[in-house]
Structure formats: C-alpha cells, structure tokens
Amino acid sequence: MLLDVPGIVRVDPMLLPFLQAADGDAEAALANLLTTQARPVVQAILRRDSRPDGADLEAEILLLLLERLRRLRRDPGGEGIRDFRGYVAVVTYNVVSRQSRRRGSERTGVPEKDGDPLLRLADPAPDAALVFERRTYLSRLWQEIRQLPPRQAAALILNLRDGQGGNAAALLPLTGIATLREMAGAVGLPPEKLAEIWHLLPLEDSALAGLLGVTRQQVINLRKSARERLARRMRGY
C-alpha cells in the first residue's frame, strides 16, 4: 500500500517514521531503517553473488541510500520511493554491475565511459528542468509499454540496455516510475521470478527465448513489433 501524504509524493509507508520524525529523532530513525530494512536486502544479494569485496560494496551501497533518504527528507515534494526494498535491490545490483565493469576496464586498460547522468546514483543531481523533462517522457513511455502484450513488453524491457550495455530497465524503479511488481505484471512474470533474474538483465535473445517459451527469432520479432508500436504512439511527444 502506498500513501499520499501532504507534501510527500507517493511513498512507501515504511519510510514515514523517518520522513515524519522530529529533527532530533530523524538520524535514529534513518539508522533503524537502513539496519532493519535495507541491510538484509543488500547482504542477501551480495551473498548470493559471492562477492569477495562484499563489505566494501555494502558500505558504498548504504552510503548511497543514506544520501538518497536524506535528500528525500529535505525535499519531500520531490521524487518519492514507492517500493523501498525494490529500490534497495536495484541500487545494490547497479553498484555490483558498475564495480564489475570497473574491474573489467582495469584489466583491459579501456577507460569506462560515462553513462546517462540519471543512471549514475553517486553523481550530483543534474539540472532540474532536464530531470523533469526526462522523467515526464519516461512516465509517458511506461504507460505505453503497459499497453503492450506481455511478451512484447518482456522482449523489450528485459533486453533494454543503457549506453554502457547495462540494465536500462533499472531506470524505472530508480525514478519511481514503476515498482518491480508493476514491471513484473507488464512482462507477464511473477514478481519473485523478475527479482530472481534482475541481476542478469539485460538478457540476451537466447535467454529470453527460453524464458518466454518461444524461438530466438520470435523474440526479435516481438521486440521489433513493440518498438514500432511505441514509435507510433510516442511520435511528436
């Protein structure tokens, strides 16, 4: 259940003790939130991936979450967090993915390229007007994606890549446009299944074919149809 609280945009109820705490109690509420709600999610993901640098990554992730929550408290009328545990999972997977790419760059000597600033959680917020423009477009795009047949949506979303080849679908929960549960509904998967494969995104066409029970060529055709429909619906927006 999401709450619409005056001055707070669509927020997960578990955040309210921190957001509505008196100034003297806010840091204690924040520490409790990170310890009891965020850390178990982070540790479960890092254990599953058997990360040797898990302690360092956990500290980095919790710092990002701490900064994001403090920013939300300072500006409760800004972007809310609709599904806190889902948001924590997305941040964790993004940090792990970024660290893996960084290690790959160090091994090959090829510098890592910067991606879209909206996908880089540790960066300062970009220009407010630009953020609003991108988020408005993304919100409209998501509404159109939800109208697609589930297999078309799955072929599109589960293969969506950012400029570095990473999981661009993560932008939806990170910006509060859609929760993981809503995304699962759009692609026709149980939420538990989407959570299970989230760290594998974007999926290659052969993996998508196995997931959807179709051929690789059918996956390509489904995605092509989805892109063509979205292009028509979004034309001129």
Image: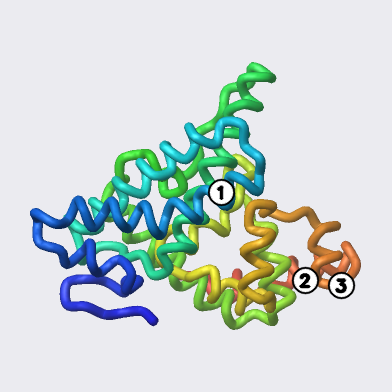
Q: Is 73 on the left-hand or right-hand side of 121?
A: left
Q: Identity of the amino acid at label 1?
A: Tyr
Give the residue displayed 88% in from the left and 71% down from the top: 214
Quickly name the residue at label 2: 222
Among all residues in the image, which is located at the extreme top? 109
Q: Residue at x 55, y 36 (%)?
A: 54
Q: Which disc number belongs to residue 93?
A: 1
Q: Quick one: label 3, few (<14), some, or many (20+) residues within 10 Å?
A: few
The CA distance from mark 2 to mark 1 is 27 Å
| Rendered view: 179 above or below 168 | below
Please say whether residue 227 is visible from this viewpoint: no
Left or right of residue 33: residue 75:
left
**Mark 3, secondary structure of its residue:** loop
Q: Mark 1 falls on what kind of element?
A: helix
Q: CA distance from mark 1 to mark 3?
A: 26 Å
Q: Nearer the viewer, mark 3 or mark 2?
A: 3
Residue 205: image location, x then y, percent = 81, 57
Q: Amino acid at mark 3?
A: Gly
Q: Residue at x 9, y 54 (%)?
A: 24
The C terminus - image quarter: bottom left
In the image, is residue 70 above or below residue 11?
above
The residue that disc 3 covers is 213
What amino acid type should be assigned to the residue bearing mark 2?
A: Leu
Residue 184 in the image, given as x and y percentages of width and height: 61, 73
Q: Residues within 10 Å of mark 2 (few under 14, many from 20)?
A: some
